[in-house]
Image (cartoon, rainbow, N blue to C red):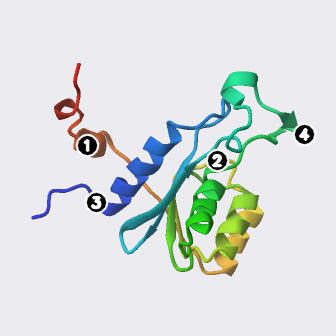
Amino acid sequence: MDDRIKWDQYFMIQAVLLSSRSTCKRLSVGAVIVRDNRIIAGGYNGSVAGDDHCLDVGCYLVDGHCLRTIHAEMNAVLQCAKFGESTDGAEIYVTDFPCLQCTKMLLQAGIKKINYLRNYHNDPYAQKLIKLKHIALKQIDLSKDDIDRIPFDSYLTK
């Protein structure tokens, strides 16, 4: 019997790890794009490279939204674009249910499945579009057992 961590939990843990690089004070989000059980890109929410980070100077809020932050899903898709990797037919693992703008972008990019960990302002129109386009949607559960499978102690130096 294969006692390894399941693929869904494995990729979601990668997204959670990416979220630790977030430069947003309001919510740390990570995303991993996967094709054929292989990671093709990852992203976290943060500023344009070279710009101020919200962690350093505060959020640039207009109408309750931070204009400085690029969402994790968008950063992952943009990484694919930058390096010439197609997103058509891929799936995404994201720590939080995508906002409406990210949902539209993911659908246009050809993402076939959205896996998410936490509900977060799940927009009704985003949900309608996901159903309209017949996109698979799955909420992933992470348990303490999944995390305990990671042998952190064997890698620690102090």
At 52% across and 41% down in the image, what residue appears? 19
- Residue 6: which disc? 3
Q: Nearer the viewer, residue 43 or 13?
A: 43
Q: Nearer the viewer, residue 83 or 125?
A: 83
Q: What element does badge 3 sit on?
A: loop
At 65% across and 76% down in the image, what residue appears? 131
- Residue 145: which disc? 1
The disc, 3 or 2, on the residue closer to the chain's N-terminal end is 3
Question: Which one is in front in this view, the residue at disc 3 or the one at disc 1?
Answer: 3
Left or right of 73: which side holds 121?
right
User: Quadrant of the rendered structure where residue 23 is?
Assistant: top right
- Mark 4 to mark 2 CA distance (whole Å): 18 Å
Q: Which residue is mark 4?
A: 63
The disc, 3 or 1, on the residue closer to the chain's N-terminal end is 3
Q: Which residue is mark 2?
A: 120
- Mark 3 to mark 1 CA distance (whole Å): 11 Å
10 Å neighbourhood of mark 4: few (<14), some, or many (≥20)? few
Q: Quadrant of the C terminus?
A: top left
The disc, 1 or 4, on the residue closer to the chain's N-terminal end is 4
Q: What element does badge 1 sit on?
A: helix
